[in-house]
Amino acid sequence: MSTPTFEQLLEAGCHFGHLKRKWNPAMAPYIFMERNGIHIIDLYKTAAKLEEASAALKSIAKAGKKVLFVATKKQAKQVIADKASQINMPYVIERWPGGMLTNFPTIRKAVKKMANIDKMSKDGTFDNLSKREKLQISRQRAKLEKTLGSIADLNRLPSALFVVDVMKEHIAVAEANRLGIPVFAMVDTNSNPNNVDFVIPANDDASKSIELILDTVVAAMAEGLEERKAEKADAPADEEAPAQAPRGRRRVARRSEEEAPAEAEVKAEEAAPAEEA
């Protein structure tokens, strides 16, 4: 797992914050200086926090848990979709469906509805409907696909959220906070980092900056998934060895059971003369 160098972060423009008048005082520890009325983020802190977040996300992926990526702003949408798809993680790049986490069963019903429409088209039920009904169902399916298609495989609540721009995605962050789901986020100088568990102070508006941070995070998670796969492959070989041990123990036990009556007879013979006396 390699963290980007200071030069790479600088080149991607991760250090550019917002105008001084738009800043959030809670971000003061991550601000290096102010230049031409714009706050400059301390990239050494960005690198350290990114390394910390990547390590935590790697362990989540290694445990086989899901991380939900959230970014509905134009600059981040495609990057999130591409990177999350690489490691088969769910993502939200259209409007955040309110109650997606706090009212998860209802969201699952909508996903199930989408699966039922797909089933109808496969088993021929769809062909028996009128042209108007087909059109209505197709439109409904397209709408569901747009908002929920990327979370179709999310059968339970995610173990963590990765957010780009906590101000824009404040509803998602609030829902995660309410349920105690850890939040990883790229936080700019105009945002409040207090509701985020793993803060990555960085420019959340430039596509280059977003891409660099996501590349690092996704690479760490991919490592975690590979390690999980390797451990699973080694597991059967490890399990075979102890499985043979009980067999040997059973033989010893059987032998001792066979020897037990013989020992009992010897003891009985030794005891007999004593009784006669």
Image (cartoon, rainbow, N blue to C red):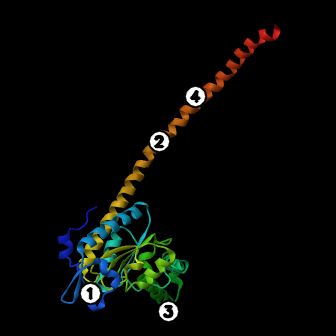
Helix, strand or loop under label 1: strand
Q: Is residue 188 left or right of residue 160?
A: left
From the viewer's perspective, is the residue at label 3 or at label 4 nearer? 4
Residue occupying the point 71% across, 16% down: 267
Q: Amino acid at mark 3?
A: Arg
Q: Which mark is residue 132?
A: 3
Q: Earlier in the sequence, mark 1 or mark 2?
A: 1
| Res 85 → quadrant | bottom left
Helix, strand or loop under label 3: helix
Q: Earlier in the sequence, mark 2 or mark 4?
A: 2
The residue under label 2 is 240
Q: Amino acid at mark 2?
A: Glu
Count neighbours of disc 1 (C-alpha within 10 A) and say few if under 14, some if 14 to 19, many if 20 or more: many
Q: Is residue 257 left or right of residue 67?
A: right
Q: Amino acid at mark 1?
A: His
Residue occupying the point 50% across, 83% down: 99
Q: Earlier in the sequence, mark 4 or mark 1?
A: 1
The residue under label 1 is 18
Q: CA distance from mark 2 to mark 4?
A: 20 Å
Q: CA distance from mark 3 to mark 2?
A: 60 Å
- Of residue 71 and residue 21, the one placed in the foreground of this image is 21
| Res 37 → quadrant | bottom left
Count neighbours of disc 4 (C-alpha within 10 A) and say few if under 14, some if 14 to 19, many if 20 or more: few
Residue 54, visible in the rendered structure: yes
Residue 124, visible in the rendered structure: no
Q: Which mark is residue 252?
A: 4
